[in-house]
Image (cartoon, rainbow, N blue to C red):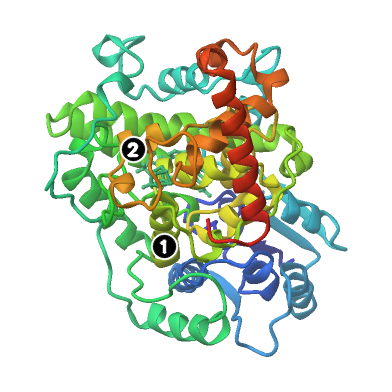
């Protein structure tokens, strides 16, 4: 009896658990480009093109490997509007009554599949180092879930950067050696770029015609769209960028969009690369003397530490996680997140590069756009939808804990032990943006005061009850309390004026 094997757009891995369970002689793979998935948030056109091109190429790869693939294109009038519609259509065509699918990385889709009038078997996604059960076991009985402890277990489990049962070099974490500021004139390697092939070019035309009103620039399009290209991008990163990955990890420079970042999240999250192979390649570079330990450890920690940790949290916390709003923030997302005018250079840089590349590196997401939204008290739902829409690597299992948890503290401290907030001083230290800004990063009050300065103190003051006793925030509150009371009053009143202008639609 034929079964349907559903392969989703971020499940483009030959070793996918649903494919491993299936029989190519009798089963039928279903892949569908459907409007519901392309449009449930206003995805960046580059992201839509990336997913569709990679799906089409993966389907072809499966056909060449002997699979029967029922593939539905977005521009085919017979294609249904949702994944469910397509499964029911294919069930009607083939007589199948059972669907095998690797568990989607989004509660919304899991719920949808469970409602289908077909037998649906959700299989574990084995493309991660920690299974959902592993993470649940690790989390059980712990009063606080901290990434650093989880990460050490992942090091032990994988043997990555281990010497016996000790961490290579004697330390688990070399962050103290990272976070430097690059010297001026420093040349950065760009990530590997690929000219669109005929499949990608056709998809680009489709996306240009159908999603031209969405925020984001479609062309030039240079992402890898298949495994062979993704492996080339990995190799290029290991050779060209990994050696200095750690040093300048947190830097932000006008006009430099990638620095030493890998841009591999895009390929990891689609399934074109596996996390362990990426980490093994990095470890080998260290063992062969090509890259230093601080860089390799920092890179591997992001993948077997943060990436696995946030996935564990997403599934542990359940479907309601994305609705969290522990700080009760209600403000609308300012229009400059969608390309509207702003006088803040740091925001303008982060948003314009997001528009052009569907990419921003971690510190831009956390300490510029995320930081501003949190300080200004923006509704975390709107922030979440923005991140989910605008980044090519955004899939809910990884985006939501980063946004709701790490960046907006909306989960009340499950992911982060304190809110990631900073005044302009941090941005000035890590970037060159303040030099060309209409605001004065040194000014604490007045018309030219950096908005991050005003909002930082107003945020701390507003949430004093929650955060003043947090041991990691004691210094911040002591500094605030040492300030002259008149100055404190002026800061708070200037911050209110700024927020009122923001709400009134003034250019801030
Ligand atoms: P690199 O700096 O080269 O890091 C290497 C790899 O480590 C990445 O490819 C990624 O797979 C992994 N990684 C690093 N940090 C994290 C992290 N915090 N969580 C999970 N994996 C991590 N990452 C996504 O993959 N998808 C998202 O939708 C996403 N949304 C985010 C939203 C916010 C508000 C914040 C603060 C972070 C978000 N991140 C997200 C995490 C991180 O910013 C990206 O993984 C990273 O910028 C991807 O670029 P890169 O591949 O060049 O990363
Ligand atoms: Fe951003 Fe403030 Fe610096 Fe301007 S002065 S770039 S708003 S941190």
Taking the image as shown, residue 449 lies to the left or right of residue 299, namely right
Residue 227, x across and y down, in percent:
37, 59
Where 61 falls versus 178 (above or below)?
A: below
Q: Which mark is residue 352?
A: 1
Q: Which mark is residue 428?
A: 2
- Residue found at x 59% / y 77%: 71
Q: Which mark is residue 224?
A: none
- Toward the bottom, the furthest residue is 77
The nearer-to-camera label among 2 and 1 is 2
- Residue found at x 72% / y 33%: 327
Judged from the image, the secondary structure of the residue bearing numbered disc 2 is helix
Total marks shown come to 2
Cβ of mark 1 under 8 Å from ligand 2: the answer is no
Where 225 falls versus 155 (above or below)?
A: below
Taking the image as shown, residue 159 lies to the left or right of residue 203, namely left
Rounded to the nearest angstrom, the CA distance separating label 2 from label 1 is 19 Å
Residue 199, x across and y down, in percent:
40, 80
Taking the image as shown, residue 291 lies to the left or right of residue 101, namely left
- Crowd rating for badge 1 (residues with CA inside 10 Å; few <14, some 14–19, many 20+): some
- Toward the front, the furthest residue is 486
Q: Quadrant of residue 217?
A: bottom left
Locate ligand 2 by image quadrant. Answer: top left
The N terminus: image quadrant: bottom right
Residue in the foreground of this view, choosing between 161 and 406? 406
Residue 66, x across and y down, in percent:
49, 70
Where 410 falls versus 487 (above or below)?
A: below
Q: Earlier in the sequence, mark 2 or mark 1?
A: 1
Residue 53, x across and y down, in percent:
45, 73
Cβ of mark 2 under 8 Å from ligand 2: the answer is yes
- Crowd rating for badge 2 (residues with CA inside 10 Å; few <14, some 14–19, many 20+): some
- Residue found at x 23% / y 39%: 242
């Amino acid at each position: 009896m034929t079964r349907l094997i559903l392969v989703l757009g971020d499940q483009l891995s030959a070793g996918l658990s649903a494919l491993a369970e299936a029989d190519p002689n009798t089963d039928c793979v279903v892949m569908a480009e459907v409007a519901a998935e392309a449009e449930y948030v206003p995805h960046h056109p580059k992201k839509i093109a990336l997913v569709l091109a990679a799906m089409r190429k993966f389907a072809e790869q499966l056909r060449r490997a002997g699979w029967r693939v029922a593939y539905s294109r977005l521009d085919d009038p017979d294609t249904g509007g949702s994944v469910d519609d397509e499964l029911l259509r294919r069930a009607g065509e083939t007589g199948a009554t059972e669907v095998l699918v690797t568990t989607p990385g989004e509660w919304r889709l899991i719920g949808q599949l469970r409602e289908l009038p077909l037998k649906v078997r959700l299989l574990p996604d084995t493309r991660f180092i920690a299974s959902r059960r592993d993470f649940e076991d690790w989390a059980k009985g712990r009063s606080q879930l901290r990434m650093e402890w989880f990460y050490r277990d992942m090091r032990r489990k994988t043997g990555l950067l281990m010497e016996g049962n000790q961490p290579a070099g004697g330390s688990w974490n070399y962050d103290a050696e990272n976070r430097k500021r690059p010297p001026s004139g420093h040349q950065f390697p760009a990530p590997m770029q690929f000219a669109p092939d005929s499949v990608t070019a056709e998809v680009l035309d489709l996306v240009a015609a159908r999603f031209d009103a969405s925020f984001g620039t479609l062309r030039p399009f240079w992402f890898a769209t298949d495994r062979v290209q993704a492996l080339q991008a990995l190799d290029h990163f290991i050779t060209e960028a990994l050696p200095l990955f750690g040093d300048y990890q947190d830097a932000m420079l006008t006009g430099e969009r990638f620095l030493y970042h890998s841009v591999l999240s895009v390929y990891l999250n689609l399934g074109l690369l596996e996390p362990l192979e990426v980490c093994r390649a990095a470890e080998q570079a260290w063992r062969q003397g090509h890259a230093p330990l601080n860089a390799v450890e920092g890179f591997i920690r992001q993948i077997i530490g943060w990436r696995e940790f946030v996935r564990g949290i997403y599934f542990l916390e359940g479907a309601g996680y994305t609705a969290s709003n522990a700080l009760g923030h209600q403000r609308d997302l300012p229009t400059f997140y969608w390309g509207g005018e702003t006088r803040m250079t740091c925001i303008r840089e982060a948003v314009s590069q997001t528009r052009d590349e569907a990419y921003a590196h971690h510190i831009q997401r956390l300490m510029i756009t995320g930081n501003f939204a949190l300080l200004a008290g923006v509704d975390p739902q709107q922030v979440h939808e923005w991140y989910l829409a605008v980044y090519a690597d955004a899939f809910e299992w990884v985006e939501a804990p980063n946004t709701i948890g790490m960046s907006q503290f909306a989960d009340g401290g499950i992911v982060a032990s304190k809110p990631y907030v900073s005044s302009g001083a941090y941005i000035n230290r890590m970037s060159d943006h303040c030099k060309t800004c209409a605001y004065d990063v040194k000014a604490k009050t007045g018309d030219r005061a950096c908005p991050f300065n005003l909002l930082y103190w107003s945020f701390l003051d507003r949430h004093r009850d929650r955060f003043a006793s947090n041991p990691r925030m004691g210094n911040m509150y002591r500094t605030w309390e040492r300030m002259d009371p008149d100055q404190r009053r002026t800061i708070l009143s200037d911050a209110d004026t700024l927020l009122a202008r923001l709400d009134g639609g003034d250019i801030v």
